Amino acid sequence: MSSSVEEFRTEVRSWLRANLTGEFAALRGRGGPGREHEAFAERLAWERHLAAAGWTCVGWPQEYGGRGATLEQQVAFHEEYALADAPARVNHLGEQLLGPTLIAFGAPEQRERFLPRIVAVDELWCQGYSEPDAGSDLANVRTRAELHDDHWEITGQKIWTSLAHESDWCFVVARTEPGSTRHQGLSYLLVPLDQPGVDIRPITQLTGTSEFNEVFFDGARTPASYLVGAPGDGWKVAMATLGFERGVSTLGQQVGFQRELEAVIELAKRNGAAADPLIRDRIARAWTGLEIIRGNALRMLDGVAAGAPGPEASIGKIYWATWHRELGELAMDVCGADGLLASGEPYDLTDWQRLYLFSRSDTIYAGSNEIQRNIIAERVLGLPKEVRG
């Protein structure tokens, strides 16, 4: 790394050390997948504290409110943030997904309206992609939007919408061309959630929490000017958003995975599970797998440098998702019989139980393993497309 990157890393580390104190000290380690319910209001206040100091959207160009950080500096930021055990971000979807999408595809008026509010964490976003019949197969979207003079009218249902109940806006993929099928006729709309015609219903998960939601649109409206790209370009824009999702922040994710693995190893030493040669072998495999995950993430950065990760990013997604699910299984086996008991009434889970239960979804959300294999086969290896009935 260049000295400028090291200087940037030192600046991030020093700021986090100085600011994760006082009222924010208790937020260390709070939030994250399966734990998004933890201290949400306090984490929102923390994120606005980050924004006031210029530590949100660090990779965005300065003209849009970011720091214009280089790719290496962005990696340093996310790694230091994770190493500091800082709380999980509440504005990830706005900062890491929608913002870069608007910078790449949005109209100047859309950038002016939405980007400053994302930087300041004044508006939170959720992602309206999956539907009951269009989860991993996103091209099967049935939610429709009709243009009426100066506004779009949206009708349909989205599901597994993370943090919709905490969000102000949703970027929605909807079918805007009647009679169109598959990838054709889709458009990408920015839709306010606080309006008549929007019904948000939390889904209770195996963890007992509800970070996922169903969202029903029944004649919900958004201005005609809140279409990103041209009508019918929704598939292209949506795929670019998914590419941004697998950007530099995944390096911070690896730090979190490493912390979890180290905690599993410590537990195995403490309760004697490490004496089992099969457990030791699985721990060794997990350590090796974590190194492979990091290698995949670093390789993917070539795509990020080119604008957005390509289909090769699916290799990284399928690998880390499977690895993390298996880590949850390993944690339960290390816990032994104790892992069968809740830590309290009526359904108070331990961190290990929550890891195990939530990580079952890792191979499903953000593109299931089956879909990732298809992408790798068709777009990376050049194999024939899957035959559809």
Image (cartoon, rainbow, N blue to C red):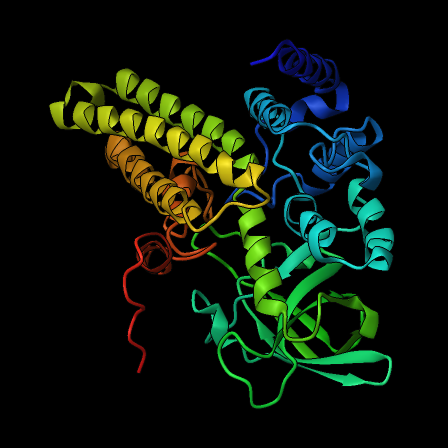
Q: Is residue 173 visible?
A: yes
Horizontal and vertical percent position of residue 380: 35, 52
Quarter of the image where the C terminus is located: bottom left
Horizontal and vertical percent position of residue 163: 63, 54
Residue depicted at x 19% and y 23%: 280
User: Residue extending furthest left?
Assistant: 277
Q: Is residue 224 left or right of residue 154?
A: right
Determine the image quadrant of residue 219: bottom right
Q: Is residue 141 left or right of residue 4?
A: left
Determine the image quadrant of residue 20: top right
In depth, the one of 234 and 324 nearer the eye is 234
Horizontal and vertical percent position of residue 40: 68, 42
Work out whether 39 lies above or below 221.
Answer: above
Horizontal and vertical percent position of residue 310: 47, 48
Quarter of the image where the N terminus is located: top right
In depth, the one of 124 and 181 nearer the eye is 181
Residue depicted at x 73% and y 54%: 102
Tally of marks: 0
Work out whether 307 lies above or below 145.
Answer: above
Residue depicted at x 37% and y 21%: 262
Residue depicted at x 71% and y 57%: 105
Q: Is residue 166 visible?
A: no
